[in-house]
Amino acid sequence: MTKWTVEELIPAIRSTMERTYNKSVESASIQEVFDVVSTIVNQTIEVNWSKTNNHYREKNPKQVYYLSMEFLIGRLLDSNLLNSGMWDVCNEALTSLGFDPIEVYRQERDPGLGNGGLGRLAACFLDSLASLNYPGHGYGIRYRYGLFEQRLINGYQVELPDDWLIKPYPWEKRRADEAIQIEFGGKAYLQQRADGSLACIYEQTDKVLAVPYDIPIVGYHNEVVNTLRLWSAEPISTKDRPDRDAHYSQLDNNHAIEQISGILYPDDSSEQGKMLRIKQQYFLVTATLKQMIKDFKATNQQSLVDFADKVVIQINDTHPSLAIPELMRILLDEERVDWDVAWAMTTKVFAYTNHTIMSEALEKWHVNQIKSLLPRLYMIIEEINERFCQTIWQDYPHLRERIPAMAIIADEQVHMARLAMVGSFSVNGVAKLHTEIIKTEEMKDFYALYPERFNNKTNGITHRRWLMMANPRLAQLITNTIGTQWIKRPRELTHLLRYTKDQPLLEKLGEIKQHNKQKLADFIHHSTGILVDSQSIFDVQIKRLHEYKRQLLNIMHVIYLYNELKENRQLEITPRTFIFAAKAAPSYYFAKEVIKLINTVAAVVNADADIKGKLKVVFLENYNVTLAERIIPAADVSEQISTASKEASGTGNMKMMMNGALTLGTLDGANIEIEQLVKPANIFIFGLRAEEVYDYYRNGGYSAHEIYQNDERINRILHQLRDGLFGQQNFENIYYQLLSANDPYFVLKDFDSYVETQQLVDQAYQQPNKWLSKSLVNIAHSGKFSSDRTIQEYATGIWKIEKL
Ligand code: 26V
């Protein structure tokens, strides 16, 4: 890669500006500067991109294909600058040209091509694959509209379309030459060929063009550039339609085709059963597989014999699991491979990651939906199911009675998680507890059948984006203290443990946190008008809004504190700013009520002079990767308070820990692994354990009503919700959910323990040195949660791929 110096980059920016906009840099807008800088970065990356691709073609190594309906990649200019080694140079060049580099990078739109944890994980994985020199690529959909933009109007969430392509996106490259024709619908039937074999005949299918847009994934300082390929749906051709009517019906049809990659579904939990969603899923998998097979044959003498040795496909949740029957279809019908051979190949290629135990999120499709949209695929799924059930019946008699609970097709539904488990050689959970729950509870029948398939891969996050880029001051302090080794080997952050009593270092750590908090306070003021005390505890809960994540517990604690402060004006508490950011699924009524509740509490508390600024509540709108990058470096307390057993892993917990926040959490997901590393002295744990939650599920015995009657604090808060909070809006629905529905997420049950633990947080913060030392311990142990570690584990444990 060209190594730029400031002296070279400045004239390059000037001349590119002249060529593109016919302007001097001095008279250019900041947007034009952004365009020019990204053009230069693109050209720089380009060289290594084709080098990497040539290398793959020539060396023909085993490659991993990461299939995901979502990739939440965030802005790319600064991360490409960082990874390609141009960051410092570019910052300096822009500054000397009179621009604030940060402002330039902020011109980029943040593509919202994902809902939350699952999509962001996919993006971190791509960054780690490239940075660790692994041959691995992402395949997804180029949604015309990403996740909705959230506005708050009068405290309510309002959704606006995310028109992210309104300006050209600088990092994508349309590859019309590599477009793939795909087919939906129609009829399929089998017919005997002259040699007696069966051919599948398709009639009247809808044909669609899948056009790839490639985005470069730049490895850190290693000259590797992998590819994220996003497919866009386009009509095949409209030219050969002279008659008017046909022309109009064609326009209609074209519109329907473009809808396939039109919009990202905004639910990250409940399965919806929408036809368009299956279309999207099939669109992704068929285009990807067809292209893979075409490329594979081109580099392997037109033969697929080695396919399963050279290709591994990771499916990100069940969303791309139609790839399993689709690969079977291609092998059977197009490659004329026998069933047994095809099945042996298929089950050697696929590996499945489960990301959730919420049963509502387990995908199921009605058989008629699959039949009508994908008739041939349905025949294949039926055959897979038949053979699977046969095997259990014959070879595992003790599991016979479990067949109805294991069958891929049951109750007129196709169960995608079952299809994924049967068709994959590996099934993994995303944190230790989550994997255990999958094995012993949620998927225990399959674990009995295929114990060797199950494995754990605890999630991770890229420390390049979430520490080096988001918090450059902290990264610099770390480097000044322990050298640069940690950048390539983040586990070496543990060298910081030698400094937990080093006064000057702790002081610098405190200054950096204070600086970041001040910047966030300015942003909050600017964007909401709320003035917050940057010396107060920044207590942060940022994630999708969901009952199981219990933002409700957090805000109930705020109401409790408010009540206490009103009752006793002399009460001393450490000043706190409670910061929330969260999108609710547009149809998730309860979640939207919680947003309104948080904003109602904020309005009352922030305006109350009696509180004397001891409490502030801030809800920042439109949570996305960019906003996360602003908030996380400023967090003191990281709220990870899901009902134990419900949060598969969490990754925000890792990001905040890496930036020196202390976790306040339940023993759920990866919090458990954080606690094991930092030890109880450096984390605040409260609430029910997963076993206790399961125990209540099995044996009953939980009464929310009893708690409501016996705990005065709760009684009072619930009445405030029911009757109108401080004379305002009432929240009867929340009241009824907690009482009539018996509080399914144990908010009331965990309230006491939460309040008590929050008091410990309050006290701990009053000893700044001890706090900073705990903060440093968290940073020191966060290296384990680099996605480099996770990818290393996938590479050796599942994928069996080698570094370039
Ligand atoms: C489900 C659906 C259902 C229908 C429409 C669209 C849609 C989109 C996504 C999902 C499933 C999302 C599951 C998910 O994000 N799980 C999270 O995965 C994180 C990464 O493994 C993990 O850290 C979180 O704990 C887990 O909740």
Image (cartoon, rainbow, N blue to C red):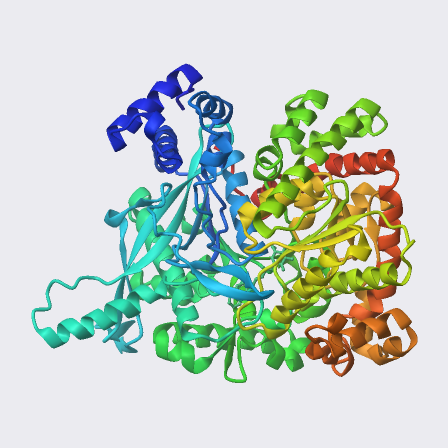
Residue 570 relative to residue 13: left or right = right
Residue 786, by quadrant, is top right
Count the labels in the image: 0
Nearer the observer, 548 or 670 = 548
Residue 639: image location, x then y, percent: 73, 53
Residue drawn at the location 39% of the way across and 21% of the way down: 2
Q: Name which quarter of the figure residue 93 lies in.
A: top left
Instruction: Give the residue at the far front of this rendering.
Output: 609
155 vs 759: above or below = below
Whether residue 5 is visible to the viewer of this picture, yes or no, is no
> Above or below — where is 584 with respect to 405?
above
* Up/down of 666 relative to 277, above or below: above
For image coordinates 43% across by 67% down, the residue present is: 325
Q: Residue at x 79, y 70 (%)?
A: 746
Counting from the top left corner in percent of width and height, residue 407 is at 56, 77
Quick check: can you spot residue 498?
A: yes
Question: Based on the displayed image, in which of its 4 quarters is residue 96 positioned?
Answer: top left
> Where is 140 relative to 711, above or below?
above
**Which quarter of the rendering shows the N terminus?**
top left
Tell me where residue 116 appears, x and y as whole percent: 56, 56
Q: In this view, does 489 lie to the left or right of 235?
A: right
At a point 27% along the width and 53% down the height, the residue shown is: 179
Which residue occupies the foreground of this view, 200 or 371?
Answer: 371
In this rendered view, identify the residue nearer to me: 764 or 462. 764
On the picture, is 244 further left or further right than 72?
Answer: left
Farthest residue in the top direction?
7
Q: Ligand 1 is in which quadrant of the figure?
A: bottom right
* 218 left or right of 702 in image: left
Q: Residue 574 appears at what percent x and percent y?
A: 84, 47
